[in-house]
Amino acid sequence: MMKTFLAGVVSTLLLATAAQAAEPVKIALIDPLSGPMASAGQPAYEHLKFAAERINANGGMNGHPVEIVGLDNKLSPQESLVQLQKAMDNGVDFITQGNGSSVASALIAGIEKHNRRNPGDERLFLNYAAVDPVFTNERCSFWHFRFDANSDMKMNALTDYLAGQKEIKKVYLINQDYSHGRSVSTQARKMLKEKRPDIEVVGNDFHPLAKVKDFTPYISKIQASGADAVITGNWGQDMTLLVKAAADFGLDAPFFTYYGASSGVATQLGEKGVDRLYQINEYYGDFEDPEMAQRQVDLYKKANWDFYYLRLSNMLDMLKKAADQEKSVNPVVIAKALEGMTLTSTTGELVMRAEDHQIQLPMFISVMDDGMKYGAEGTEFNFHKVARIERDDVTLPTTCRMRRPK
């Protein structure tokens, strides 16, 4: 028994040593790391570094250590292209980003342009949160993989749940005024009409991205509308300030959100969010899996951020599986290996659909609760699971007609 244990320890140490000796695989995160939306970019950066440490401790990607490079784009598509060029000039083969579909749009175009002009020096875009559906439909690209459910998939799951909430008769929509927010609004109206034609949409507001400091005027309109519920795709500061204004104003209507667990929400809202703030996500705060629970504890202790981005861990696990399977860290080889790949995650089996490079996964509806074993942001509040939507029920068809390299 002792010999077996020692052999395992030696094997792990040898894997880690070999990974450290090889050239690193660089993954650049291009996201807002300063300014009002840094509360979305910074936790992703810390989560990526945290996940990379686990990958490296298990031999890296085909023996290569993973190195995370953080590049601040200040939420600007133009600055993102500057940072993209900087990353490529410094030998980064894999680009990841998630905050802002306008940024993702620019990065997809920039990487496609580079790869067309530089055969043999291709780069890969790993999208962890930019959820505009066009990226895996009419604008699908071989060089783009999305590890988060797109906006339509989330709304499909969310409206399935809302269809069963008979007490909800009036819904108010409020979203950021860009492609993602517009998509949330369009699909909410379309899917609610299909699944609950008796629900009335009593408001449909759009506001500038990362510009509003006081949402009270919007909350006043929601209150006056008599809405039974609010649906929003807001994220980052726009999510935190919106729900804080609702709590301060005394609005009782529940909020059904894409990003209710955005950084700062638990601290700002506290008990005012209990049983009122819902989110649709690939994970929740109950942490039934002991390993996931320990990661929450470890990440918060290490970086003072919560374990929010399960999809980033899944993304690196898929990259490692592809690299180890193909004995290569070449972006083209990795891309081909990712097509159709399955991964057993803590929530079930995930599939990277080959047709459009859109991850297929189960989703969860959760609501803020108190007295949680693993509280967010050092509080007792986190999100408690109320419904699971199976992968096949989240899945939607694609219109993608992808051009693949020869």
Image (cartoon, rainbow, N blue to C red):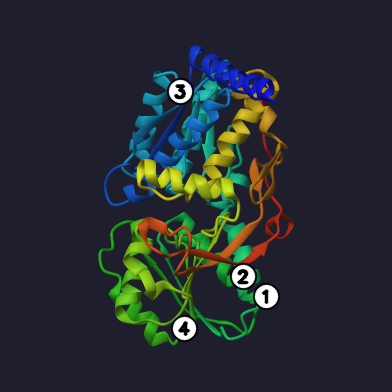
The residue that mark 4 highlights is: 227
What amino acid does circle 1 point to? Lys
The residues tagged by marks 2 and 4 sit, at their Cα atoms, a distance apart of 16 Å
For the point 56% across and 69% down, which residue is it? 188
Which comes before the other along the chain, label 2 or label 4? 2
Judging depth in this view, the residue of 78 and 248 nearest the camera is 248
The residue that mark 3 highlights is: 92
Label pair 1/2, CB-CB below 8 angstroms: yes
For the point 62% across and 70% down, which residue is it? 159
Judging depth in this view, the residue of 26 and 268 nearest the camera is 268
Question: In the rendered image, which quarter is residue 166 located in?
Answer: bottom right
Q: Is residue 242 above or below residue 236?
A: below
Single out the mark in the foreground, 1 or 3: 3
The residue that mark 2 highlights is: 159
Label pair 3/4, CB-CB below 8 angstroms: no
Q: Is residue 369 above or below residue 328?
A: below
What amino acid does circle 3 point to? Val
At numbered mark 2, what does the secondary structure look like: helix, strand or loop? helix
Q: Position of residue 304 (x, y in %)?
A: 35, 47
The residues tagged by marks 1 and 3 sit, at their Cα atoms, a distance apart of 45 Å
At numbered mark 3, what does the secondary structure look like: helix, strand or loop? loop
Judging depth in this view, the residue of 357 and 264 nearest the camera is 264
The residues tagged by marks 4 and 1 sit, at their Cα atoms, a distance apart of 18 Å
The residues tagged by marks 2 and 3 sit, at their Cα atoms, a distance apart of 40 Å
Label pair 4/1, CB-CB below 8 angstroms: no
